[in-house]
Amino acid sequence: MSDVVAIMSMSLDGFVAGPDDDVMQVFDWYFASGDVEFTTGGSDPMTFRVSEPSARHLRELTPQLGAVLTGRRTFEVAQGWGGNHAWGPAFVVTHDVPDGWPRPDSTVHFVTDGLESAVRQAKDAAGAKSVGVHGADTIQQLLNAGLVDYLQIDVAALLLGSGVRLFDHLETTPAVLGDPSVIAGVGVTHLRYPVRPAQSA
């Protein structure tokens, strides 16, 4: 059965973007942490330059992903990934389909009937692989609904002080996570935690 994996880069003090929505500092490790090239797929491929531990992490992570789930804001910031996300079909939770979409030869789908429907569709598309989730708000909603299996957090060696927090608006805390796997890169630490089901009172 497909797992749902929340995947985000975050500053050490918990922010995924600065107060002006700038994400470049928390993503800087993708482009300036080493000399090993890693090229994404999709319609709008990028080439990362990372340390060997981070390259190994990305090589292990990306083949496990078969679909992506995110919100409208992330879709807009990413400019629709050129129509095809590197991880496979993308499912965007939104109230309405943006003008000009869906597009021919695109694997971006818009889900207007709720988060649980989006999860079902993404899991069906992913098959035996995992669903990767982007976006702070979407991850928070999924955590509140008990629909996240793993947190894959890339902690940048950075203190932002303010901005968009990854773990705001959580309804069920404290939440105890399983033991992490840890990969120490250059300028970033890759953490993967299993999310334990909430215990009923």
Image: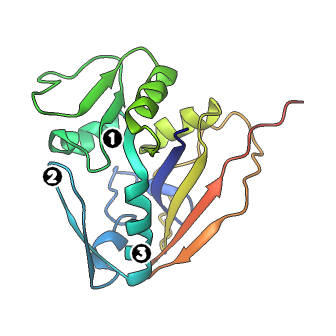
* Residue of label 3: 56
Callout in the foreground (3, 1): 3
Q: Amino acid at mark 2?
A: Asp
Amino acid found under the numbered disc labelled 1: Thr
Q: Earlier in the sequence, mark 3 or mark 1?
A: 3
Q: What color scheme is it?
A: rainbow
Q: Is residue 90 shown to the viewer in this render?
A: yes
Q: Secondary structure at mark 3?
A: helix
Q: Does 139 appear above or below 42?
A: above
Residue 198 image-quadrant placement = top right
Q: Is residue 61 left or right of residue 146?
A: left
Q: Earlier in the sequence, mark 3 or mark 2?
A: 2
- Asked if the residues shown at circle 3 and circle 1 are in contact, with their CB atoms under 8 angstroms apart, the answer is no
Residue 95, placed above or below residue 157 = above
Mark nearer the viewer, 1 or 2: 2
* Left or right for 77, reference 4: left
Residue 48 falls in image quadrant: bottom left
Residue 44's label in the rendered image is 2
Image coordinates for residue 66, horizontal then vertical, percent: 38, 44
Secondary element type, mark 2? loop
- Residue, x 39% and y 67% (percent of image)? 58
Residue 166 point in image, percent of width and height: 53, 49
Mark 1 highlights which residue? Answer: 74
Check disc 3 and give the amino acid type: Arg
In percent of width and height, residue 152 lies at 53, 57
- Looking at this view, is 70 or 76 the one in front? 70
Q: Residue furthest right?
A: 201
